[in-house]
Amino acid sequence: MWKLYVLGRNGAFKCFRCNAAGSWFDFQNKLLQRHGTNGLHAETAAQATAPTSQPSKGLRDREFGTSQGLKTPVLLDGSQYIQQAEALLKDAAGMEYLTGTEGNQRGLSLDTIKKYKVGLTHLRWDKEEICISFPWLRAKQAASSPDDLEMVRYKVRAMRDKSKMRLQPKGGGWGFFGWHLVKEEHSEIILTEGEFDAMAVSEGVPDIPAVSLPNGASSLPPELLPVLERFNKVYLWMDNDAVGQEAIRKFAAKLGRGRCLIVGDGSELLPEGSALPKDANDALKIHGPDLVRRMVYSARRLPHSRVVGFEELRGEILHELLHPDQICGVKCQSLPQLDKIVKGHRRGELTIVTGPTGCGKTTLLSQLSLDYCRQGINTLWGSFEIRNSRLGKKMLMQHAAASMEMEVSSENFSDLADRFEELPLYFLNFHGSSDVDEVLDAMEYAAYAHDVEHVVLDNLQFMLSGQGRGYDRFDMQDRSIEKFRRFSTRHNIHVTLVIHPRKEADNEPLGMQSVFGGAKATQEADNIWILQHVVPHGTSASVKYLEVKKNRFDGDLGSVHLRFDRQQQSFVTRSDAEIKAMRTQKPG
């Protein structure tokens, strides 16, 4: 695939031959490193290699892009928002939460709160919540003063429950919290995972602007890359957990490894035995602004992606020893018994799922993918057997946790769809027989543009139908599985692939050898799950259970007995009493 893409809207590039990817900054440097600057006039070469002191002409108009396919949002009146935000300074509960140092309080100064224009509002989820609002502000084009601002959007987060977050207005553009503090003379910037972290960093390092990513560690939208091109150094300070550390590698690839500096966990700056801060806000609240400043100025560059020494691995090994629960992966909340066997959902793995036709594989996988989606795992669904509208309906009903077939109305559908739309869920637009390289092309784009961490492909036979005869079918399937395995490893993305079983005797449990095709699938897979559906001899009740036949993570194997709950349109785990009753039920 001799293809190189340069996205016209932001200059990001992707080479599908060598897998190189990054920003316009990286592309420019790679060309200059390879071909040199001898063929350029001296002044042209200097302009090409020197960072610009201000965005190029026309860049300011698209400073914060819009989501793909959406119209440019109407900019909000920044001054009106700021007047409303000042109400926070008169609210005792809000100010105590932001300035206090107890429990989950934030330990921020009043000056920082004012500087970042943080506000207070009320929004309703299951009940009305007091929320902190974080504006995405920028200077107006003909600004007459530093306070002459316009607002692209703002994020609200409940004080009581940080999982309750919302972006307002719905369908708006992307922006950075704190961008209004970035001036033309700044050549360095600090990117943090959260809004409170950006404000904490600002207290320790007031000379370098600190801004927050719009979606935390979940994604860095390509629409925002152009405004970061001007900076010589980009400091990345993510949370000290598995998700945050993985985000560092992901974002550095987008921004250009050469100019990214990674803020460490502070272990070399603290006395031995001291608790390490989990994020920048924690560092400020517990250890003060001096530690924040020292952590930023001791930031290091990422090591070479292909060559590392033990020095670079020490921190990662220590983290795994101290936090074994984090390396297990994201927990499955809807089927906890499955989680006891597989120990979580991990990136970079290939899971093969098989089972008889009509046993519920799609239903089960849509349920599990929604489970992980609700926990912040960006997911890409590729259904080659049923159309996206039918799949979307199934997932919408599962997300609502109740069948709404007879109760749907325009009012409740709109509310439910709005909540469903907030999930980090995307769909591949393929159906039936499809070229594997085109599917991989779309997966590559989703990995870059939407930072997907989980891809579900349902199913391999429908994807390859009609593309081979006889033994060619097996060779084509093996080559496809090899490509999906390579994609999973290279991009550190979990790929779940459905493969229908061979024709087996009715009412007999399936085994590893039942997976259709050659041995490639079972060899390459990290996990093999079989959704069994049988009627045990001597009984009349059919039994459905998910059997884990391969688990490369720790070797644990086992089964989870399932029952389909029509009210929830999802599977639930059977109790021990139910299983015992089924085993003793006689025919007739």
Image (spheres, rainbow, N blue to C red):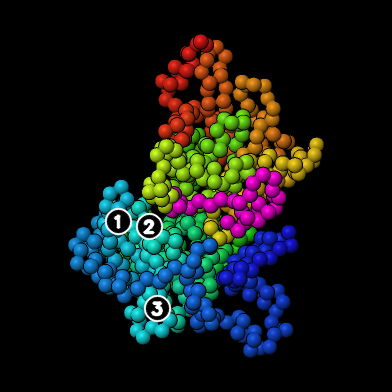
Image-quadrant location for residue 331: top left
Q: Which residue is mark 3?
A: 139
What crowding class fits label 3: few (fewer than 14 Cα within 10 Å), some (14-19), or many (20 or more)?
Answer: many
How far, Cα to Cα, is label 1 from label 2?
9 Å
Image-quadrant location for residue 308: bottom right
Residue 16 screen position, x and y as percent: 68, 60
Report helix, strand or loop for mark 3.
Answer: strand
Numbered disc in front, either 3 or 1: 1
**Amino acid type of the residue tagged 3 in the rendering:** Ala
**Amino acid type of the residue tagged 2 in the rendering:** Arg
**Which numbered disc, 3 or 2, marks the residue that appears first in the sequence?**
3
Image-quadrant location for residue 277: bottom left
Work out whether residue 404 can be spotted: yes
How far, Cα to Cα, is label 3 from label 2?
24 Å
Residue 294 screen position, x and y as percent: 39, 69
Pick the residue in front: 309 or 296: 296
What crowding class fits label 1: few (fewer than 14 Cα within 10 Å), some (14-19), or many (20 or more)?
Answer: some
Q: Which residues are magenta?
A: 419-446
Report helix, strand or loop for mark 1.
Answer: strand
Pick the residue in front: 544 or 320: 544
**Amino acid type of the residue tagged 1 in the rendering:** Leu
> Residue drawn 56% across and 50% down?
427
Q: Which residue is mark 1?
A: 123
> Residue drawn 56% across and 46% down?
388
